Image (tube, helix red, strand yellow):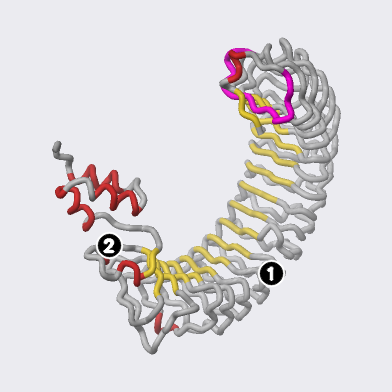
Amino acid sequence: MLSIPKDIILTIGEELTDWEKIQLTMVSRSMDKFKYKFMYYGTVKIATIKKLPYFDNFESVIMQSAREKCPKHVEEVYFDEKNMDYGKGRWMPDCITHLTLDDSYDDFDRSYVPESVTHLTFGEWFDHDIVDFIPPSVTHLTFGGWFNSSIRNNIPASVVELTFGENFNRSIKNGIPPSVKYIFFDMMFNRSLKGNIPQSVIQLEFDNESYFNRPIKNSIPSSVLYLTFGQKFNQPIKGHIPSSVIQLTFGNEFNQSIKGAIPLSVTHLNFDGVFNRSIKGNIPSSVTHLSILGCFNKSIHNAIPSSVIWLEFGDDFNQPKGNIPSSVRYLDFGCDFNQPIRGAIPSSVTHLYFGYSFDQPIKGSIPSSVTHLIFGGMFDQPIKNNIPPSIIEIEFGSNFQQSLNSLPLSIKKIRISRKYTKKISKRLQSKIYRY
């Protein structure tokens, strides 16, 4: 048998599942020795592997008893709450770096947590005092859904990523150390941020269903690059978004004026829900990705800057053609859009998607730059000589019953409804995908 260098076999092993690794080692006696060299990353019960001679090579295990021995190279330990006997005193091996408690477990002794742990995740029901609880080795800290205890001076200065569960709604004054770079608040949090978010934070995110709706004047530090608000936020933002922010997202209930409010640093700007304000002159020339979903249905004439390459509209948008800039490559119209498009789509667009209601003639309307084209449910217009040969993938909605046989040979994939009844030429049949 041809000899393969050990390093190559180990590299191949990194791409295999644990089961595939074992199968590979069974090929020959020379391969069998790699059974003891491969590391195994799948999560398994200790009881299942405890008698294996390569026991120490498992990195993620489920413990059912404090009396169970952990593998030497274990990094992640999960607890089977239904059967777990925790015993007394410290018993976890010092090599553990990731510690996750069972969702229904609500009692844990600080002495159990070795200072090797860098990623600590509490169970769903954990809601205890955490004074002197979190070891100074922890860099990633995640609380479960029911945690709502004080964090004042209780989060160690080692933590860089901090995630709260859905019921957390305590004051964060003196609670977040200046080491934290990433903060994620869940549903119930609705406390003042002013003076409470350290200058170290680069990502501040509220859950999509977040109740947070507090004034943000002088509240967002100039270190923040990524800022995401949840569904309830609807406060004035002019002068309150720092010029450091590059990605800015608003939730369902935001409908404030954005005139002079979006800093020139923003490249990705996302609106959703009820937002329906004028955007003319209000989208800075720094924006490259603009998503205006939900209820937005205002004129876009001279409103989209020439910096935008990704443009996405929501279900309510149905305005006559504006002057979409020639920088746009990705263009997505929402459900209600049903306006004539002749002369409206710039020749820069490569991905063009229409929503459910669109059913307008497309003769001379699809530029030769388009490679991916999707029509929605109601579209049923003639396509003969109207689809450019640049198209690689095309999709038609459930109402479409026009002949496909004039489609260019360049198309590699055609998605049509199972309801489509027209005869399809043999040259196209291998490209058809029905849904």
The crowd level at tag 1 (other Cα within 10 Å; few <14, some 14-19, many 20+) is many
- The amino acid on which the numbered mark 2 sits, given as a three-letter code, is Asn
- Looking at the rendered image, the quarter that the C terminus falls into is top right
Is residue 333 or residue 178 the one in the foreground? 333
Magenta range is 408-422
Q: Give the left or right position of residue 129, taking residue 89 as reference.
A: right
Residue drawn 56% across the image and 76% down it: 104
Is residue 419 or residue 375 the one in the foreground? 419
Q: Position of residue 206 (x, y in %)?
A: 66, 60
Which of marks 1 and 2 precedes in the sequence?
2
| Residue at numbered disc 1 | 189
Residue 194 occupies quadrant: bottom right
Residue 4 occupies quadrant: top left
Q: Main secondary structure of the magenta part?
A: loop
Q: Position of residue 158 (x, y in %)?
A: 44, 69
Relative to residue 284, is residue 255 depicted above or below? below
Q: Give the left or right position of residue 384, taking residue 119 as reference.
A: right
Q: Secondary structure at mark 1?
A: loop
| Residue at numbered disc 2 | 57
Residue drawn 30% across the image and 50% down it: 21
Residue drawn 70% across the image and 45% down it: 270
Q: Give the left or right position of residue 114, taking residue 150 as reference.
A: left
- The amino acid on which the numbered mark 1 sits, given as a three-letter code, is Phe
